[in-house]
Image: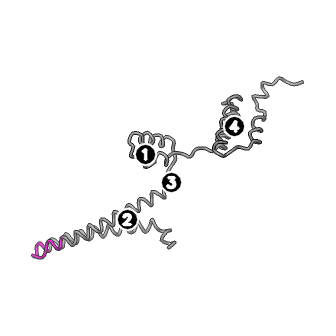
Amino acid sequence: MNWVKDNRLLLLFAAVVLTTLGTVGIGIVGVVATLGALLGGGAVVQTFATFLLGTLLLVGVDIVLSVALVRALARRASVPKSQRVAGGLGRLESIIPPLASLGLSDVFAPPEPTVEERHEALTRRYVEGELSEAEYERELQALLGEGERTGTELLDDDIATDLSRPTATDTEYEPARE
């Protein structure tokens, strides 16, 4: 049974190919047999109905197997995450409400950054000089409040270390001590 699971896509593909070839083959044989019955004076309706039923049955099986193959391929494919695509799909879902049930905007949305990742980004912006010390502290306090609400907290030692760590801007503005 494990071999079947491992080779599921290959087996589905082979089944789709075989049922498609079988459908075409039965269709061709049915046309030839119906023409033969028509020219030979046999039971045309009975011959035609038999091959038509067989062809329709194989078409149905072929459709089911094709859908199963596409579904298995879609599950296996990795979906690239993009905020732009997620936003576009979100707008489309708001315009066409039935699309919202599919949740496509959630599928394409990149994962929300963790509190730790946002803390690192905030510290990097402060070190690079994009934020003043007051802005950094204000955003850090907001981030800490959010971290406590979500249940993930930054270590207090890390925050205290970040706040008390001297930076180049601190030493530039401090008067020289003598």
Q: Which mark is on residue 100? A: 1
Answer with mark 1 or mark 3, whichever residue precedes in sequence.
3
Provide the major secondary structure of the magenta segment. Answer: helix
Which mark's residue is nearer the viewer, 1 or 4?
Answer: 1
Amino acid at pointer 1: Ala
In the rendered structure, the answer to whether residue 174 lies left or right of residue 152 reads right
Which mark's residue is nearer the viewer, 1 or 3?
Answer: 1
The residue identified by callout 3 is 78
Q: Which mark is on residue 65? A: 2
Alpha carbon separation for disc pair 4 and 2: 53 Å
Magenta region: 37-48
Answer with mark 4 or mark 3, whichever residue precedes in sequence.
3
- The residue shown at (31%, 68%) is 21
Amino acid at pointer 2: Leu
Please tell me which residue lies in front, 6 or 100.
Answer: 100
The residue identified by callout 4 is 123
Q: Position of residue 52 (x, y in %)?
A: 22, 68
Alpha carbon separation for disc pair 1 and 2: 28 Å
Alpha carbon separation for disc pair 4 and 3: 32 Å
